[in-house]
């Protein structure tokens, strides 16, 4: 697998090198690798990048994914079931149907054109043209048309038609195995029932998952389906193991601080007593098989230096045996024999793959099959019969080896694929997985050796992997690579701390800032340095900044320095004009109320430093995170000015002189007070933040987690002195609940914000006060005043309405339409020596959102509209355009 991984990933290195040509080369030098990567992916779709890499791993190694029928399983099923779909849906995927990822589409598209043109360099010509002029819309499709005479949609249609015809022809020659389906289906949503295992009462345990279901254990019996248990983040090893009423499996767990440091642990669940047990922790075990007497677990330990060790532990996690592996083979899918005396396992070496048995007491190993490059799997021993999956006919089926006579037989003949056999203890039935139109089914057939077919070496129908392998002519490329041993030494973190690797322009998801600069990150990702120029698109101002983040310790140390020329337009304010020339100076001028645009400008120097501790709390079925941080910031402002004054205050009253010239009255006028600006002076602040979330894992169709909680806490203060003082504490939590129907969501938030300032009072003696920016969600569609205390809450109901899968040519592809109805409430209050003031806010409304793709980009956009109706304090109707998250 390491060879295949190296071939695949190095192909991406070559692709990026080839994309650095023409106009892209100029962009690379001007704006850096990130811009090159963006333009290279805009010009050439993601399916080519990954499909070409899969072709490479397949052509140059004996184990590439293109050789495995299971890789094409869903694609093949869809085509043969009349679900060819259109190019846009096949590439951009769908919420309505299960579509294989772009790796599968890309492998078939790349291989098909190479076969059709008989030209192994055809994609070099296509991508070379596309990468030279990446800014022209649909340049990739135009390049295909120039080289072949048809566009990318034509290429897909031709490929799908030819593959469908070839697969239908193959299926027409088959005599399919009749079976009895065990699971019932009450929906056409694609759903798999995987790895059937027999329980003590004769029922079947299976792992259910699908486009609308998270992974969960289900019990099948007498045509009924019963929910059993929802496991955590599965490390699927292609198997489950049950003994009696106990089931064991593997889950991922993570180091609480470093996400790259992960573990694969073994968990056990008692289905009868509903008890969950952590068998191991902080281990690297793959696969788990419980012995018939329920006392031992066979598994495979993967070490950090790429060795695999067949291991046996007891149910408390204590290691009982590690079997020697002098050949440095790769073991997988270990499973006990029915009597518990030996372990059956797959064994992979440079010679290929076979099935072996290992005597538990002596460690003696026996090989059952000659080594081959076929993707055999799921070995199960029952008496003298060894069952396993094999793709030797070009379709995955279940085969059996008579270990006494050496005779090999074919047990099933499937249209799409048969996998994962298990045999009843009385030897009456075989349960296994059969691929169907809407997912994997659990089926059964009689245990009848007389019906099994004699094994024949079947010449596979010619497929793409044979074509590309012949074109390249080097199926064992890695055998010719010189084997060189390199000396190792300790890495010096100090000498490698500065390692510039990138410069360029970046956009955040709000499309409000452009960041131009260089980045430096050492090899171990312990020190990150960013320096450059940050341009604010809304303000049309820029800032030079330098940031350093040291992440080698448990807490992360962040330091940021910034110098900016700021400019903010506050819009039009209303002023009062008074004529002071007349005998009675209070006589108002004609049109005495007038508006004037107010714009603030200032220079700003900011230093912020602090520590943060991000902890991963993902556990079992829930994703989780807990982050706590504290930062000290110093902001120094000079040259603060606006249209009227050089202060944060602007007089409300203008007076007219003898020449009818209006001048602001600084001494006797009430004024506008902009407390959230730092005037000429220094703000020294402390910012403490805490955030955490715990969210149930989601299926593809889920809009929000069915169960979840998140909290956000912020405390801003000025305990270190400076020219300004302020204090603000805010907190809000969001809760998620299931809706009335599947994929519906009932959710809402509750928040509080307290600001220790006499808001609403006479502030003439408090001009050094500073109000920190709002940190909690506010009622939608209303203009909200600032108060000393503000409470906010909301109730929302979100549901999907339609999965249209409609494309308007190559311009836009609509995948999902969803709506959200909401009710928002807010209450603010302030008190001062002059009295108290409070106000209630209430609004209702709805949001219509569309999940879509633009210009055939795989990234999905969330765009919509919001209608809000304010009920309190006044009736007001608001329409807003929404640009939500962009999934990159």
Image (cartoon, rainbow, N blue to C red):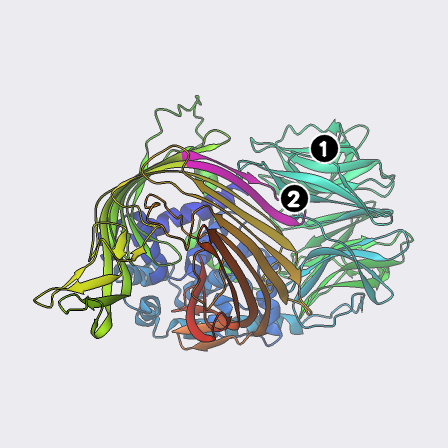
Segment tinted magenta in the rendering: 610-631
Say whether residue 529 is visible. Answer: no
The residue tagged 2 is 619
Tell me if residue 720 comes above or below residue 672 in the rendering: above
| Other-residue count near label 1 (Cα within 10 Å), few / some / many at <14 / 14–19 / ≥20 | some
Q: Nearer the viewer, mark 1 or mark 2?
A: 2
Split into 4 quadrants, where in the image is the N terminus? top right
Asked where in the image residue 395 lies, by quadrant, the reply is bottom right
Q: Secondary structure at mark 1?
A: strand
Q: Is residue 130 left or right of residue 718?
A: left
Asked where in the image residue 350 lies, by quadrant, the reply is top right
Q: Secondary structure at mark 2?
A: loop
- The dominant secondary structure in magenta is strand
Split into 4 quadrants, where in the image is the C terminus? bottom left
Measure how far apart labels 1 and 2 are at the Cα level.
25 Å
- Badges 1 and 2: C-beta atoms under 8 Å apart? no
């Amino acid at each position: 697998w390491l060879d295949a991984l190296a071939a695949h990933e190095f192909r991406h290195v070559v692709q990026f090198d080839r994309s650095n040509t023409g106009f892209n080369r100029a962009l690379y030098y001007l704006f850096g690798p990130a811009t090159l990567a963006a333009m290279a992916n805009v010009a050439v779709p993601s399916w080519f990048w990954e499909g070409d890499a899969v072709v490479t791993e397949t052509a140059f190694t004996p184990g590439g994914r293109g050789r495995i029928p299971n890789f094409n399983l869903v694609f093949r099923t869809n085509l043969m079931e009349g679900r060819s779909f259109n190019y846009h849906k096949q590439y951009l995927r769908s919420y309505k149907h299960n579509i294989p990822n772009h790796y599968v589409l890309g492998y078939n598209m790349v291989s098909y054109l190479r076969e059709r043109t008989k030209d192994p360099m055809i994609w070099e010509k296509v991508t070379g043209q596309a990468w030279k002029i990446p800014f022209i819309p649909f340049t990739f499709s135009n390049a295909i048309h120039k080289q072949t005479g048809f566009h990318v949609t034509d290429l897909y249609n031709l490929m799908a038609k030819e593959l469908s015809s070839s697969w239908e022809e193959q299926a027409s020659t088959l005599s399919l195995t009749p079976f009895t389906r065990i699971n019932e289906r009450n929906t056409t949503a694609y759903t798999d029932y995987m790895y059937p295992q027999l329980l003590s009462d004769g029922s079947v345990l299976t792992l259910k998952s699908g486009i609308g279901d998270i992974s969960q254990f289900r019990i099948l019996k007498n045509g009924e389906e019963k929910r059993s248990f929802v496991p955590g983040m599965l490390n699927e090893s292609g198997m489950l193991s049950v003994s009696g009423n106990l089931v064991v499996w593997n889950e991922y767990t993570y180091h609480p601080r470093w996400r790259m440091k992960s573990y694969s642990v073994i968990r056990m669940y008692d289905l009868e007593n509903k008890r969950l047990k952590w068998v191991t922790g902080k281990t690297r075990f793959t696969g788990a098989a419980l012995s018939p007497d329920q006392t031992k677990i066979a598994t495979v330990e993967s070490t950090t230096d790429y060795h695999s060790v067949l291991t046996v532990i007891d149910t408390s996690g204590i290691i009982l045996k590690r079997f020697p592996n002098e050949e440095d083979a790769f073991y997988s899918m270990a499973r006990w024999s029915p009597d518990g005396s030996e372990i059956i396992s797959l064994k992979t070496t440079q010679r290929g793959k076979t099935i072996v048995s290992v005597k538990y007491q002596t460690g003696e190993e026996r090989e059952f099959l000659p080594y081959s490059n076929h993707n055999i799997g799921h070995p199960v021993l029952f008496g003298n019969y060894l069952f396993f999956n094999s793709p030797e006919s070009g379709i995955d089926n279940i085969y059996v080896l008579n270990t006494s006579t050496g005779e090999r037989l074919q047990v099933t003949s499937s249209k799409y694929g048969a996998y994962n056999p298990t045999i009843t203890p009385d030897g009456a039935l075989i349960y296994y997985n059969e691929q169907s139109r809407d997912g994997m089914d659990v089926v059964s057939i009689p245990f009848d050796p007389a019906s099994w077919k004699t094994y024949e070496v079947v010449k596979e129908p010619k497929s793409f992997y044979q074509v590309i392998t012949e074109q390249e002519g080097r199926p064992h490329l890695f055998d010719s690579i010189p084997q060189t041993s390199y000396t190792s030494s300790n890495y010096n973190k100090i000498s490698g701390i500065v390692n510039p690797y990138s410069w360029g322009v970046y956009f955040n998801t709000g499309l409000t800032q452009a960041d131009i600069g260089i980045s430096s990150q050492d090899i171990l990702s312990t020190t990150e340095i960013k320096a450059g120029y940050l341009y604010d698109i809304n303000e049309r101002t820029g800032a030079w900044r330098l940031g350093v983040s040291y992440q080698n310790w448990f807490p992360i140390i962040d330091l940021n320095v910034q110098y900016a020329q700021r400019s903010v337009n506050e819009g039009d304010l209303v002023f009062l004009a008074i004529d002071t020339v007349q005998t009675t100076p209070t006589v108002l001028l004609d049109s005495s109320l007038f508006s004037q645009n107010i714009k603030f400008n200032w220079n700003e120097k900011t230093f912020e430093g602090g520590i943060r501790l991000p902890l991963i709390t993902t556990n079992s079925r829930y994703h989780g995170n807990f982050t706590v941080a504290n930062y000290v910031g110093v902001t120094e402002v000079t040259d603060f000015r606006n249209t009227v004054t050089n202060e944060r205050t602007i007089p409300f009253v203008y007076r007219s002189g003898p020449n009818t010239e209006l001048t602001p009255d600084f001494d006797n006028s009430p004024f506008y007070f902009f407390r959230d600006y730092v005037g000429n002076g220094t703000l020294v602040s402390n910012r403490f933040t805490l955030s955490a979330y715990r969210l149930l894992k989601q299926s593809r169709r889920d809009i929000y987690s069915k169960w979840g909680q998140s909290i956000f806490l912020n405390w801003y203060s000025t305990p270190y002195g400076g020219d300004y003082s302020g204090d603000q504490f805010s907190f809000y939590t969001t809760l998620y609940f299931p809706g009335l129907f599947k994929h519906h969501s009932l959710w809402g938030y509750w928040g509080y914000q307290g600001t220790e300032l006499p808001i609403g009072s006479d502030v003439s003696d408090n001009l050094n006060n500073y109000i920190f920016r709002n940190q909690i969600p506010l009622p939608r569609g209303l203009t909200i005043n600032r108060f000393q205390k503000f409470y906010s809450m909301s109730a929302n109901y979100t549901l999907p309405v339609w999965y249209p899968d409609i494309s308007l040519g190559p311009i836009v592809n609509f995948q999902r339409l969803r709506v959200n109805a909401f009710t928002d409430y807010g209450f603010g209050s302030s008190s001062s020596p002059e009295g108290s003031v409070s106000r209630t806010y209430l609004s209702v409304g709805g949001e219509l959102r569309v999940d879509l793709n633009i210009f055939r980009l795989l990234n999905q956009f969330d765009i919509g509209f919001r209608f809000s109706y304010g009920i309190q304090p006044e009736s007001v109707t608001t329409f807003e355009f929404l640009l939500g998250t962009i999934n990159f």
